[in-house]
Image (cartoon, rainbow, N blue to C red):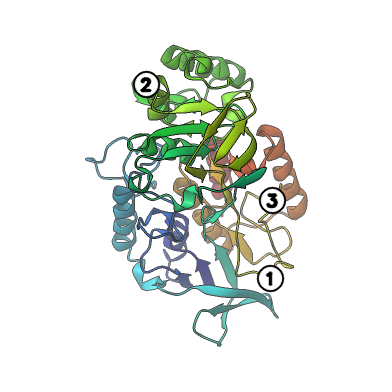
Amino acid sequence: MRIAIIGAGCSGIAALKQLTRTGEHEVVCFEQNDRIGGNWVFTTDVGHSSVCETTHIISSKRLSQYSDFPMPEEYPDYPSHDQILAYFESYVEYFGLMQHIRLHTKVEKAIPAEGGRWKLYVAGSDEAQDYDLLLVANGHHSVPRHARIFGQFTGEYLHSHSYKQNLPFKGKRVLVIGGGNSACDCAVECSRVAKSVTISMRRPHYIVPKFMMGKPTDTFNDTLRYVPEVLADVIRRKSLALQIGTYEDYGLQSPEFPLTKDHPTVNSELLYMLRHGKVTARPGIELVENLSVSFTDGTTEEFDVIIGATGYKIATPFFDPDLLDYTEADRIPLYLRMFHPEIKNLIFIGLVQPQGAVWPLSEAQGKLVASYVDGAWKLPANLKLLAEAEADRIAKEFLPGKRHTVEVHFKPYLDQLLKEIKKAV
């Protein structure tokens, strides 16, 4: 079988490793950049990657490593972006994957062809390449979703995707829009050099410290996975309250929903900066006029810069939009968050937003695809019904909004994949 993978980031290389383990199939991984690593390749130029100079992962080392390739012992609890990239490069080298990766090769078109195949056209070539199976692992943090602002701002506006370093904001009045991880990172880093920093959150968010009871927060939560969810939620809330007090102490709104209903914002420094007056919290924006921004609490301030940390669109620019377009989707029905219910030779890898690291999940997805390709695991007959049911479950388990279109609970989803892998014969 001829198999194509689009993207050599953390998800693409995980799938590639699984599909090349037997040597029975021809597998090619297309990467548009000059090195592997996808989102974890830091440059000062604006491009595919969204990491900035000071980015560290927000899941712990222990729960973020591939199952058969541990991170170096000397790595800290929360490795930096350059350590993570070095880890991925070591993974590719150790398992001999580079021979299957084509760097500087952008897939511009992927077109379904006769006989259940795919025709792929790459940049710089008019000749199509035929494949039996297409895996999409191009990530979902490269095309910004911009803030909706009422009025006209005459200062500088940028999306957090374009934020790379804090030096351009020295001495400026900065407003950051959003309550996710990128928003908090931008606010914290800018506060080190800016004249003032304000962060605007239109709704409450759980801002969770990176350590809980002396442990990385995700490992602390992992100890609760066998506790009934009602009790676990009480323990999480009480532990968080003991750790930080109330969100009102920081000028923030207190959430009234369970911790697991929202994608976690893991940041210890924002809370520190708020209590030290380096960052000011405001609710949503009501109106913008020139440099003046009015908030829903009745306050008005002037800013030189607005950073919109308002998320990303799920982009698959190589597909004809009439075939598939998830950019504005509120629900994405895929079986196991992978298998398209109608296009049986199209599989997504890493199209999940976990409450944890994505690449251990991509590794499990890759194992399942390998069993599928080898004929050891079969797709269910009621594929479309199951895909719709999964989309319904996401809508029920998480707060409404595009932030949670592909959200999953890390451990339950991993267990679901491992259960299917064990069915392979």
Q: Name the residue under label 1.
A: 320
- What amino acid is found at the position of numbered circle 2 in the picture? His
- In this view, the residue in front, 368 or 375, is 368
Comes first in the chain, label 3 or label 2? 2
Residue 106's spot in the image, x, y percent?
Answer: 49, 73
For marks 3 and 1, the one nearer the N-term is 1
Mark 2 lies on a secondary structure that is loop
Q: Mark 2 points at which residue?
A: 276
243 vs 150, left or right, is left
**Alpha carbon of mark 3 to alpha carbon of mark 2: how far?**
42 Å
Disc 1 element: loop
Q: Position of residue 397 (x, y in %)?
A: 67, 33
Say above or below: 325 vs 228. below
Q: Do the residues labelled 3 and 1 touch (CB within 8 Å)?
A: no
Q: Is residue 33 above or below residue 150?
A: below
* Secondary structure type for disc 3: loop
Q: Residues within 10 Å of mark 2 (few under 14, many from 20)?
A: few
| Front disc: 3 or 1 | 1
Locate residue 181, reporting x and y percent: 47, 38
User: Label 3, label 1: how many angstroms apart (C-alpha)?
Assistant: 17 Å
Q: Tell me what residue is drawn at x 29 percent, y 54 percent.
A: 86
